[in-house]
Image (spheres, rainbow, N blue to C red):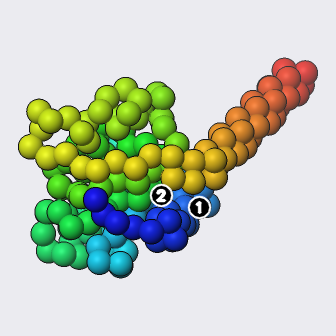
């Protein structure tokens, strides 16, 4: 058991939300993550798949890589991950392989989550490592970030489509 107080959990999730907002600012899906060790953030990440055109540029992967580099070690045994959405199978695999002690996350991801939704990778006793799981941390706030982002994205795409249709119609009438 990690023994974080509610105040500490809130503090670290705030840092993950700050990362999610960085993703949103560059039109990436707003997911953020931080790795914490001994009361310090040692790894930060936010989604950058579109920006980097890299499938593995998930917030968790970036935060884990930064933590590995900062510690000079691939093992993150005394570290905890805070992330704004349930990790996918790729990120859950990286969490297990890096031996993170625990994961705290916001809402479940029914279409891609591999902690509770589709699979239970982090607590599968067939694997060589399991980690403590804390779900639903600031769930509503994290969900709202995602919902607002996708609502705005759909509206923008609808406007762009209408503009293209209008331009095509104008071109046909010439």
Q: Is residue 4 above or below residue 110?
A: below
Picture layout, residue 123 above or below residue 41: above
Percent from the top left, x then y, of residue 59? 40, 55
Q: In the picture, which quadrant includes the N terminus? A: bottom left
Badge 1: residue crowd in 10 Å (few <14, some 14–19, many ≥20) = many
**Element at badge 2?**
strand
Residue found 57% across the figure and 48% down from its top: 139
Q: Is residue 87 above or below residue 124?
A: below
Q: Is residue 81 left or right of residue 76?
A: right
- Residue 119 seen from this side: yes
Specify the quadrant of the image occupied by residue 127.
top left
Q: Residues within 10 Å of mark 2 (few under 14, many from 20)?
A: many
Q: Which residue is mark 2?
A: 32
Task: Relative to 126, say whether 7 is above or below.
Answer: below
Question: Would you name the residue on which mark 1 appears?
Answer: 21
Q: Quadrant of residue 2?
A: bottom left
Q: Nearer the viewer, residue 29 or 141?
A: 141
Q: Secondary structure at mark 1?
A: helix
Q: In whole angstroms, how far apart are the C-alphas of marks 2 and 1?
A: 8 Å
């Amino acid at each position: 058991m990690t023994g974080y107080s509610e105040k500490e959990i809130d503090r670290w999730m705030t840092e993950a939300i700050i990362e999610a907002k960085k993703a949103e600012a560059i039109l990436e899906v707003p997911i953020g993550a931080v790795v914490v060790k001994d009361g310090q953030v040692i790894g930060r990440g936010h989604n950058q798949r579109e920006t980097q055109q890299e499938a593995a540029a998930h917030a968790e992967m970036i935060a884990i890589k930064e933590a590995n580099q900062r510690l000079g070690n691939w093992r993150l045994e005394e570290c905890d991950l805070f992330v704004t959405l349930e990790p996918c199978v790729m990120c859950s695999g990286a969490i297990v392989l890096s031996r993170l002690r625990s994961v705290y996350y916001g809402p479940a991801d029914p279409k891609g989550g591999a902690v509770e939704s589709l699979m239970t990778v982090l607590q599968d006793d067939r694997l060589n490592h399991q980690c403590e799981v804390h779900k639903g941390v600031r769930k509503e706030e994290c969900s709202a970030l995602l919902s607002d982002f996708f609502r705005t994205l759909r509206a923008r795409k609808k406007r762009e489509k209408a503009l293209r249709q209008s331009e095509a119609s104008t071109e046909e009438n010439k």
